[in-house]
Image (tube, grey):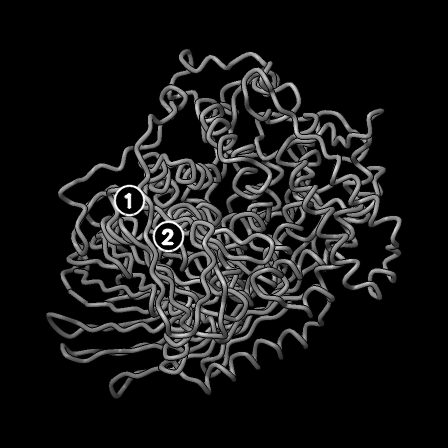
Amino acid sequence: MITHPAYAVEPWCLRETELNLEVLPQSESVFALANGHIGWRGNLDEGEPHGLPGSYLNGVYELRPLPYAEAGYGYPESGQTVIDVTNGKVIRLLVDDEPFDLRYGRLVHHERVLDFRTGLLERTVEWTSPSGRTVRVRSTRLVSFSQRAVAAVAYEVEPVDGDARIVLQSELVANEQLPRTGGDPRVAAVLESPLVPEEHSAEEGVLRLVHRTQRSGLRVATAAVHAVDGPEGTKTYSRSSADLSRYTVTSVLRPGQRLRLEKTVAYGWSGVRSLPAMHDQVDAALAGATSTGWRGLVAEQEQYLREFWERADVEVDGDAEIQQAVRFALFHVLQAGARAECRAIAAKGLTGPGYDGHSFWDTETFVLPVLTCTAPLAAAQPLRWRHATLPAALNRAQQLGLKGAAFPWRTLNGDECSAYWPAGTAAFHVNADIADAVVRYLLATGDTTFEREVGLELLVHTARLWRSLGHHDHQGRFHIDGVTGPDEYSAIADDNVYTNLMAQQNLRVAADVAERQRDLAAGLGVDDEETAAWRDAAARMVLPYNEALGVHEQSNGFTGHQLWDFAGTSPEQYPLMLHFPYFDIYRKQVIKQADLVLAMYLRGDAFTEEQKARNFAYYEPLTVRDSSLSACVQAVMAAEVGQLRLAYDYLGEAAMMDLSDLESNTRDGVHIASLAGTWIALVAGFGGMRHCDGTVTFAPKLPEQLGRLAFTVQVLQRRLRVEINGQSATYELVDGEALEVEHYGEPLRLERGAVVSRKVPHIPDTPAPAQPAGRQPAHRGWAPGRQEGGAAEM
């Protein structure tokens, strides 16, 4: 995608200096704006040309059939797919009756800038129509963080070389025509015109459309209001129909005159509210936004982001691409969750329809740790959503013959919609991932209200699943058999170490919290006998270990499997699951993504330093990274075992996943978890930050390519800034009461405003383990173009 000199490397923005239609779908994803509730892809204002039109509301989906060659008990009956809702972005322009279409006439200048500090997407265009009239167009777009239901566009046009008759058509458009997909035609049929019209109107500059989804029964309301500033003689018209509501502005402009249109759009949806109620809801949101005004919305956006960056910024000296990428990443992670408010965070956020808009374990394991340390209020919301879906998870467990809750592998509404059970239902680790996110949130915030209202129940029901799913053998050891861990190339395995270790933590913490909240736990039927059973299962959990090799087995018997023929696999045959049968993959030692290595990061307390080094060296040559979730984890563990050069290369892969379109699917939306992994690789990898047993610890180290790394995190209502260079690390408590941390095991007491410095030990270079043939991470060498503020490859 963005391997083009039109994309500059700048520290605080993403800038495109010319339009490239061949990468238009990818640019629509990276330039997308969202707030966790509304998502607008970065489509051109005029609507066409486009790669993939997209306007999304978090939680709005349509039901679709799931294909099965043979029926089976417990198979999900239907899936859910995110849909393109009413498009409020569109502002069409006609110049002397000729449509402004960049495929015609002459494009003199085109630039788009996404500013991470203001949250604005700004576009400037100079275009000469086929008849020779030149105009300048400026547009600014935002999706509000401060007013959850609101998005807005300011649009200006002026003639350059003579009088011009200008027509602007501001529209609300439903049931847009989408590009044909090569997938299941039944799915395509569901997504074609999924919205049934219920109400439309256009009067005095106020547009409104209300629709209802055909199968899922969700009502979607959209309204827009306009403010026009133009010369005398400017006129306006309105009209509407079932799927289109339009406000038209006409004017004749002389050079130096401008026609400005400010468009404010409000969205709402519900599965239970009536049509009048939804009508009133979006009208009320518009009224609030109108009272604020365009300038007020811009000011609120800047204030929101100023406060975010004060507590979340990461500074990187020595690699301008990584500096830009980590801020790009944090901005998109914030956009995915800032105002989700009891809704899920999808794998692609609200930037595209990839993975059908589903939420996976990615959210809890990769995204929420970042939000917990940078935007704690946003981190709580997806967990509250998980809590709200507990009834579905309890029903699913019962259907599977288990106790407790079985949370879905992929979902939009809480129901399982994975049709492939070995990589779906069998991946029970999602339960422990949710529990881990609860633990991390409680450690970082000390939120006792959340513990009582949400955390306890999630921990209790997930712990009950493990006690039901696992069993004690004749020696009293506790096994969890027939599950799929994070590595989806190894399915239905016994005693997957990651699953067992995360379940072990789940069981222990559930017992701790239940004993701390005895009154509420008793209401859930928890007694001393049950908590004792949880602790016993945790204490006797089996962790397979190969004594001869001196490494932990990813799962029982894994190291005895035949090695995959890496030398005989060509680069074109990756990802493996698209070129080889799962039957063959499952029987071999080949790993899609970090599994046991992920366990060493999240449960580092369960391994010695020597075990981590030996395990990393063993599994590195087996891991092909056919998942975007792997590179950041491998970066963290490479840094921990002293492989700083390798860690730096993996950081680059995680950071550039979307900016370089490394998996060739950025057109479907950005990879929110890999973006979060950029922060994880820097803060947990090179910063060495861990939060275990209530103590925040650091073991910082930098590769020689980076001169300085600084980051700010939120811990227990305190703001902590850490700065690292090649020789030392400094810790400063910016805000809050005194905090105790550790630097390489040394306790440090930090007082507000004081700066404490400690030396960073030298990490000697050691031989790096090999990767599978052809699957090495790209080496991050130096290039003349990699300079801040200039054009460079991305």
Q: Position of residue 77 (x, y in %)?
A: 75, 40
- Front-most of residues 41 and 227: 41
Q: Position of residue 611 (x, y in %)?
A: 52, 30
**Disc number at residue 258?**
none
Can residue 524 be seen in this snapshot? yes
Return the residue at label 2: 30
Q: Is residue 335 above or below residue 793?
A: below
The residue shown at (70%, 33%) is 426
The residue shown at (67%, 51%) is 435
Q: Is residue 758 left or right of residue 494?
A: left
Q: SS of the residue at dot 1?
A: loop
Q: How many marks?
A: 2
Q: Is residue 600 above or below residue 313?
A: above
The residue shown at (37%, 21%) is 571
- Front-most of residues 479 and 288: 479
Q: Position of residue 789 (x, y in %)?
A: 18, 56
Quarter that holds the N terminus: top left
Q: Is residue 786 left or right of residue 226?
A: left
Number of other residues with Cα within 10 Å of mark 2, as a class: few under 14, some 14 to 19, many 20 or more: many
**Disc number at residue 2?**
1
Can residue 669 be seen in this snapshot? no
Q: Which numbered disc flags the more N-terminal residue, 1 or 2?
A: 1
- Front-most of residues 447 and 362: 447
- Front-most of residues 65 and 419: 419
